[in-house]
């Protein structure tokens, strides 16, 4: 349990980095005079998309070659550097660089984290431990948005932020330059959590399954593992299945993770403080839903929770099209349903199945490859979304229909290809799928 909690902090930092950017994106927009296209590039190169994609393809195969602990020992130093660059940014290129570095670190850490959690779990608690990791993914945004709400202009703790800004840049600084300090402070909290997580993860032992595989393998180089992954038909089919369900769901989730408060402000006409509050409430439902599911995911058929989460997501988008994002009732209903979806999301099962359906020698590398595909295409989608959505949310309805189509694909493909792994050890699953000579 201790190791699961330590590694799960990576999920806190992953989602926290995305939401820290989104919660203050309007403040950075005002401070640096950014267009919607600028915001699209920030999303594209961040932990939400391309930055994480680049990191994942690197980190996955490094974790298979040098071990999961190798990633935990060095990766969060890169994360802290990225967050520090964002905190000190005074120009768009510097802000973009900070988002990119942070995103790369997030991508490096994700495959190793999910792999380590599964390999360190027992048969009857593997799903539960993945849910604990997912809860951390929900706690990150919940706390970050809560801080963002308190520290935002008009928030309860904005006065100390304003005083800090005056002390650093002077009392005659532009109002936008003062207000953006609330976002800088939010990123500082991520720096502190990353430092704590790095300290804890450096003390972890290497995965026993990785150690055993390294001792038995004749060829375990990175190139060998890549060749094996791409030439094994079962592995290729598994990559296609998992990448499809995760991509279609993540194209929707990535937009909501980065643009949700911005959508509330532009299409819904809400203040930055209220937008962050509603987003925070959504993540409360994520944590509560995942907590409840964690008690049953190893006992009840995965199909039930998979359908339940996507049904909530589809209902949310269908209802908000009917009720309109400009109505407070519609916004609240959407917020709650989307939170429930994230708590029982495709990502929970992608993380679980992704670490179950591949052998140890390229388990993290396969996840890194899929994460690269998903987050890379999410980067492109983030740029396309800004065109569909428009500067003031005039294209919101069209964007919502796109979301519904993507979620339906995730539902249908998931039901068709869903594996039966509950109650089986990783070694048993590997032998059933690949035989004894993998």
Image: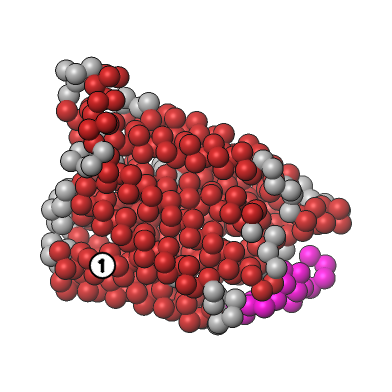
x 70%, y 61%: residue: 119
Q: Position of residue 62 (x, y in %)?
A: 67, 45
User: Which one is nearer the viewer's eye here, 75 or 58?
Assistant: 75
The quadrant of the picture occupied by the C terminus is: bottom right
Here the colouring is secondary structure
x 68%, y 64%: residue: 121
Which corner quadrant of the image does residue 160 belong to?
top left
Please indicate whether residue 186 sits to the left or right of residue 319 in the image. Answer: right
User: Which one is nearer the viewer's eye here, 203 or 408?
Assistant: 203
Q: Secondary structure at mark 1?
A: helix
Disc 1 crowd rating (10 Å Cα; few below 14, some 14-19, many 20+) is: many
Highlighted range, magenta = 419-438
- Whether residue 422 is in magenta: the answer is yes
User: Which one is nearer the viewer's eye here, 3 or 100?
Assistant: 3
- Whether residue 349 is in magenta: the answer is no
x 50%, y 31%: residue: 81
**Residue at mark 1:** 334
Residue 38, above or below 228:
above
Which corner quadrant of the image does residue 184 belong to?
top left
Please indicate whether residue 408 sits to the left or right of residue 391 in the image. Answer: right
Q: Position of residue 401 (x, y in %)?
A: 26, 69
The quadrant of the picture occupied by the N terminus is: bottom right
Q: Position of residue 157 (x, y in %)?
A: 26, 38
Q: Is residue 326 among the parts visible in the rendering?
A: yes
Q: Position of residue 89 (x, y in %)?
A: 35, 27
Tally of numbered tags: 1
Please indicate whether residue 319 sits to the left or right of residue 430 in the image. Answer: left
Residue 20, above or below 401:
above
x 62%, y 56%: residue: 4
């Amino acid at each position: 349990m201790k190791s699961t909690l330590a590694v799960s902090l990576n999920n806190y930092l992953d989602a926290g980095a995305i939401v820290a950017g989104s919660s203050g994106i309007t403040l950075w927009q005002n401070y640096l005079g950014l267009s919607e296209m600028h915001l699209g590039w920030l999303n594209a190169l961040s932990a939400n998309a391309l930055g994480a994609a680049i990191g994942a393809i690197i980190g996955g195969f490094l974790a298979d070659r040098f071990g999961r602990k190798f990633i935990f020992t060095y990766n969060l130093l890169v994360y802290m550097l990225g967050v520090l660059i964002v905190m000190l940014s005074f120009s768009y290129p510097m802000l973009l660089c900070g988002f990119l570095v942070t995103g790369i670190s997030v991508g490096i850490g994700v495959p190793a984290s999910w792999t380590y959690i599964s390999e360190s779990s027992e048969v009857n608690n593997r799903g539960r431990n993945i849910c604990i990791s997912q809860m951390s993914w929900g706690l990150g945004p919940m706390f970050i948005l809560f801080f963002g709400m308190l520290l935002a202009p008009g928030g309860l703790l904005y006065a100390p932020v304003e005083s800090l800004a005056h002390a650093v840049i002077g009392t005659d600084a532009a109002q936008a330059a003062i207000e953006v300090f609330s976002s800088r402070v939010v990123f500082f909290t991520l720096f502190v959590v990353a430092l704590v997580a790095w300290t804890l993860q450096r003390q972890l032992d290497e995965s026993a399954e990785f150690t055993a595989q390294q001792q038995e393998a004749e060829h375990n180089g990175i190139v060998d593992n890549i060749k094996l992954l791409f030439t094994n038909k079962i592995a290729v089919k598994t990559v296609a299945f998992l990448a499809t369900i995760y991509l279609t769901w993540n194209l929707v989730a990535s937009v909501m993770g980065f643009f949700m408060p911005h959508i509330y402000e532009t299409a819904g006409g809400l203040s930055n403080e209220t937008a962050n509050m509603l987003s925070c409430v959504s993540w409360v439902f994520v944590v509560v839903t995942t907590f409840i599911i964690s008690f049953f995911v190893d006992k009840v058929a995965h199909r039930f929770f998979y359908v339940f989460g996507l049904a909530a997501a589809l209902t949310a988008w269908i209802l908000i099209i009917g009720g309109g994002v400009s109505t407070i009732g519609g916004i609240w209903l959407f917020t709650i349903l989307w939170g429930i979806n994230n708590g029982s999301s495709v990502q929970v099962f992608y993380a679980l199945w992704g670490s179950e359906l591949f052998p140890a020698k390229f388990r993290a590398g396969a996840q890194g490859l899929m994460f690269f595909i998903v987050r890379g295409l999410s980067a492109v989608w983030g740029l396309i979304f800004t065109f569909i959505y428009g500067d003031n949310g005039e294209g919101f309805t069209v964007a919502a229909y796109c979301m519904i189509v993507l979620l339906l694909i995730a539902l249908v493909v998931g039901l068709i290809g869903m594996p039966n792994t509950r109650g089986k050890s990783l070694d048993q699953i590997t032998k059933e799928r690949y035989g004894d000579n993998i």
